[in-house]
Image (spheres, grey):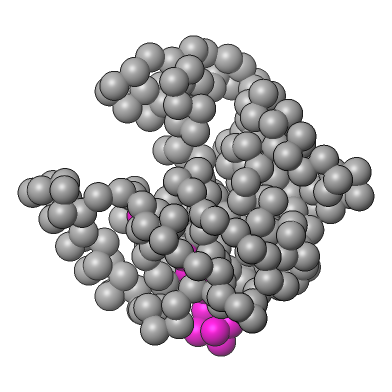
Amino acid sequence: MDRNLIFDIGLHRGLDANFYLRKGFRVVGLEAVQDLCAQAAKLNKEFCKSGRLTIVQKALYGASNESVEFYINPEKDDWGSLFRGVAEKGVGSSRRIFVETITLSDLIEQHGTPYYLKCDIEGGDSILSEQLCLQVEKPEFVSLEATNIDDFDRLRMCGYDRFQLVNQYVNPFTMAPRPAREGRYAEVTFNHHMSGLFGKELQASLWVDFAEVTRQYLDWRSLRERNENLAPGWLDVHACRQESL
């Protein structure tokens, strides 16, 4: 494992990558949409020149080197997905393109095993969790969007035994710790297009075991179904092993 390497799967416009890079990490960003790759490259121009940011214009999928349908929402570029219903979310329309694919195994073979892996690929997080289970060497920390309870179980099957839910809606109110607990300190104002803090910079007291994180998620989802105003936003689930904390 390369402790200086982060995988940003779902690079989008490169905002998360910029934060990781300014903290001193090397980043491999995976993004299916050409225009978003260009925006990420422009934002992180100097890091691309230095080789610290590598952008891979492909989609995570069950097999590499295939051409598959991908759906872009013209009103919400962060909703792009392999799945039309996810890209539209019942409130919009989408445009179909074709993108090349890669597996997690091939990404790791080409670039190494990352210290932290962030996944935010609109309906594709289960692709990540399924493939992660097949890796012999796994990232020390991993996060993905919490939309399917089966992903929690697969993270446990990967050997992770500590979990933390983070409501992405409150990211703009989150401050990066100073001194930094991951890499070096980088001043940042998080927005709703960013995943926020990770690893040891998350609140230490909020790491829980599998049974508790499952309860928390089901409680949040139940409350949201009854009254969305009482449970706004969306959740990421972070995972690690106890010895990593």
Q: Give residue 206's position: percent from left, percent from top.
A: 37, 78
Regarding residue 49, the answer to whether it shows in the image is: yes
Q: Give residue 91's position: percent from left, percent from top.
A: 29, 21
Q: Is residue 182 left or right of residue 223?
A: right
Q: Is residue 47 magenta?
A: no
Residue that sits furthest to the bottom in the current view: 243
Q: Is residue 238 magenta?
A: yes
Q: Is residue 201 left or right of residue 153?
A: right
Image height of 66 relative to 135, above or below: above
Q: Is residue 12 left or right of residue 71?
A: right
Region in magenta: 235-245
Q: Name the foreground residue: 43 vs 183.
A: 43
Q: Give residue 220's position: percent from left, percent from top.
A: 21, 59
Residue displayed at 48% across by 17% down: 74
Q: Give residue 167's position: percent from left, percent from top.
A: 35, 58
Residue that sits furthest to the right in the current view: 50
